[in-house]
């Protein structure tokens, strides 16, 4: 149910839209959208608000060409055979998965003055990818949900809790985001599902005062998965490294990329090389993206040869520059997988009708896509979807 309230401030009329819902989900990444799907299938009214101008959170795929309908990943990329939730969700959504290409020799760049070494015995473990990029997973989830319940470009400003439930104030992050145009500025909900990085949640006014004793400190201490990482990907017309008997894997002590992989969008198209940048976030921030982009491309040439110099398209994504992802603590810390045990606070949280989901909250597989889905599974089990 929605209502409009007209306020008068210094002669200016302001319209505030208030909406009542049973469940409010804060965050539209994998965990938030998967939680929305559970509620949608159970017929439970909900509203989802995402601060970024798109859904997906840290899942991001960029197109292999201007007219391509699929892309290469600049966020989370792989999952593994033991991670059954990811495999089940892809099957449920009708998405194809394929095996990460690892056939061929591995390269080692020990120093700038020595030739790159080639080794035929260093291939990685079996892993899977979503065909066309992990963003396909987000698109498929969004397609299953009621668009009227989803709003991006809409940030949470304040959260309060009282006898009547949760009251959340929101505001548009950009005037150019259509999905934010009709988003409510005030949401009242019985249940609150928090599906954003814990450290970013703790920056919301009022939330700390609502939480059980000790939980704000635990949330603040939890590192944001992937927040300090930067990734580079270059797309080529042919997989020339495979033609040379190479896997696409390379490891470097020179940098700026410390680890490189074949990042092709499908098993036989969108051929790409992808690298993790080893330069700390605090150092990267002092250089322009163009300088780092050029350094990565030059490194691909030094490792794979002259054919790496002319990709069809290339992308650099520095997650430490994403204000809705990274916090100051994440920039200063070494990257690590999150480990947050909420069990001590669960009884109080359940009484308050507050729920946490996300990769940082996962009881297992924290810092992975699988962990995000596992947290939603726990939410569904422990809440019994408010039965």
Image (cartoon, rainbow, N blue to C red):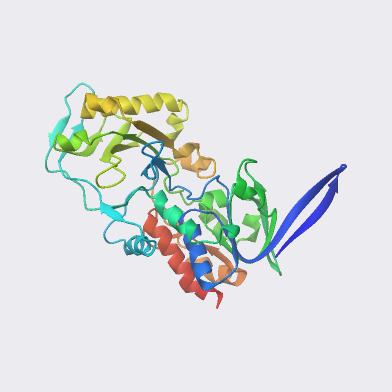
Picture quarter with the N terminus: bottom right
To which quarter of the image does residue 241 belong?
top left
- Which residue: 35% across, 48% down? 132
Left of 72 or right of it: where is 126? left
Residue 159 to residue 88: above or below: above
Image position, residue 73 (x, y; %): 37, 44
Image position, residue 17 (x, y; %): 73, 55
Image position, residue 331 (x, y; %): 47, 39
To which quarter of the image does residue 2 belong?
bottom right
Mark yes or no: residue 267 visible.
yes
Left of 4 or right of it: where is 321? left
Image position, residue 115 (x, y; %): 16, 25
Left of 376 or right of it: where is 4? right
**In the image shown, does 161 or 95 lie closer to the viewer?**
95
- Which residue: 24% across, 45% down? 268
- Which residue: 47% across, 26% down? 286
Picture quarter with the C terminus: bottom right
To which quarter of the image does residue 363 belong?
bottom left
**In the image shown, does 140 or 377 lie closer to the viewer?**
140
For this orientation, the residue located farthest to the front is 67
Residue 5 to residue 263: above or below: below
């Amino acid at each position: 149910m929605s209502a409009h309230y007209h306020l008068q401030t210094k002669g200016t009329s302001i319209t505030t839209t208030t909406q009542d819902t049973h469940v409010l989900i804060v965050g539209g990444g994998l965990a938030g959208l998967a939680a929305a799907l559970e509620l949608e299938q159970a017929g439970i009214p909900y509203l989802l608000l995402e601060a970024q101008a798109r859904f997906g959170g840290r899942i991001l795929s960029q197109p292999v060409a201007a007219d391509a309908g699929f892309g290469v990943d600049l966020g989370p990329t792989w999952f593994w055979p033991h991670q059954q939730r990811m495999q089940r969700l892809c099957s449920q959504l009708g998405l194809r998965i394929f095996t990460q290409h690892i056939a061929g020799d591995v390269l080692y760049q020990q120093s700038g003055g020595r030739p790159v070494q080639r080794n035929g015995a260093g291939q990685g473990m079996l892993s899977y990818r979503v065909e066309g990029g992990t963003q396909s997973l987000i698109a498929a989830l969004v397609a299953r949900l009621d668009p009227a319940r989803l709003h991006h470009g809409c940030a949470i400003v304040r959260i309060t809790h009282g006898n009547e439930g949760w009251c959340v104030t929101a505001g548009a992050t950009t005037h150019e985001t259509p999905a934010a145009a009709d988003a409510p500025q005030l949401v009242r909900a019985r249940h609150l599902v928090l599906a954003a990085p814990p450290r970013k949640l703790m920056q919301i006014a009022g939330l700390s005062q609502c939480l059980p004793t000790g939980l704000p400190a635990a949330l603040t201490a939890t590192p944001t998965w992937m927040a300090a990482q930067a990734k580079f990907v270059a797309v080529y017309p042919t997989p020339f490294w495979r033609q040379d008997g190479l896997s696409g894997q390379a490891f470097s002590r020179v940098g700026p990329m410390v680890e490189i992989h074949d990042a092709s969008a499908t098993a036989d198209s969108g051929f790409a090389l992808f690298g993790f940048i080893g330069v700390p976030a605090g150092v990267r921030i002092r250089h322009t993206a163009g300088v780092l982009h050029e350094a990565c491309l030059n490194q691909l040439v030094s490792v794979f040869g002259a054919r790496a110099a002319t990709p069809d398209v290339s992308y650099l994504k520095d997650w430490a520059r994403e204000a809705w992802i990274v916090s100051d603590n994440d920039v200063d810390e070494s990257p690590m997988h999150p480990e947050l045990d909420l069990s001590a606070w669960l009884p109080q949280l359940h009484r308050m009708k507050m729920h946490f989901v996300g990769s940082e909250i996962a009881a297992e597989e924290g810092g992975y896509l699988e962990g995000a889905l596992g947290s939603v599974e726990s939410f569904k089990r422990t809440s019994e979807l408010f039965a």
